[in-house]
Amino acid sequence: MGQKSNEFTQKLTAAMTKASTDVGRCSNGLALIGYNRHDMDQALEKIEAKMKLQPTKTFEELAKTDAELKKLGEKFENAEKELETNKAKLKATVTLAQTSVNSAQDVITKFLAFCTEKAKTWNPLKKKSLAKSLAALSKANVDLANLKKFLDGVADLQKQKGNLA
Amino acid sequence: MKLSKLKFADVQKLATANEAAEKASKEGATKLGDAQKVVAAAEKQVESESKELQTTDE
């Protein structure tokens, strides 16, 4: 009996550690995208200031006689290339994190069912301890469900043009 | 996106969209970081309570 609980605990903590690590990777991936956007933003700000002086001309026309503008354009396009790479990486990381969260939830569901079944024959002391475990497991389940919604939101944003992806 | 054919008004639009996306990325990263902390705390709680459950099982 104790052995079985121990197995569930080990499985669950391993699954939750993995979920937490994978979500951390998503967070880092989004932060990298934020830095790329920031670099693009800085370049665009300077490009805007230069192009404002001759608003009817294209970037190409103006860059022919303005070396600094040309350099800014290259800076923008390089940051955008990095952004595309990081977006692709984030997509893969989000998928991985979604899988990890699903696995952790699956273990919780099985652990909860196991505890509920065994509690039918337990004495009051065990039941008191069980109540705490059930509360912790249920809370973890809610936290993971919220996390899953948020990851789904990130995945949806990636599908929308002009947003995170 | 190639800048070559863009005029000032196009660049302005691009800058506005990029700024919004930058904000969304940074907010998303912060929210995910917070969510990660919540899950890590839940993990410790589950571990601790389950240990107690095992003890009473023996």
Image (cartoon, rainbow, N blue to C red):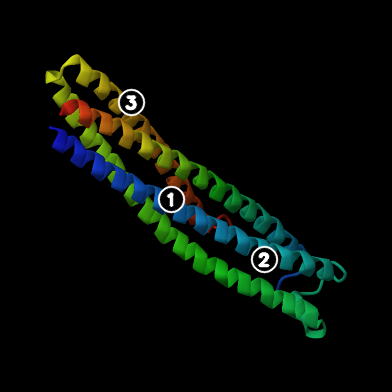
Q: Which circle's residue, 2 or 1, is located before the other in the chain?
A: 1
Q: Earlier in the sequence, mark 3 or mark 1?
A: 1
The disc placed on residue A40 is 2
Q: Which residue is mark 3?
A: A135
| Residue A107 placement: quadrant | top left
Q: Dot 2: what SS? A: helix
Task: Name the residue located 17 percent from the left edge and 22 percent from the top edge.
Answer: A119
User: Left or right: A54 with respect to A5?
Assistant: right
Q: Tell me the crowding category of disc 1: few under 14, some 14 to 19, or many 20 or more residues within 10 angstroms, Cα based.
A: many
| Numbered label attached to residue A23 | 1
Closer to the camera in the image, A81 or B41:
B41
* Comparing labels 3 and 1, the label whose residue is closer to the camera: 3
Q: Residue at x 50, y 69 (%)?
A: A85
Disc nearest the viewer among 2 and 1: 1
Query: Marks 2 and 3: in contact by CB < 8 Å?
Result: no
The answer to which of marks 3 and 2 sits earlier in the sequence is 2
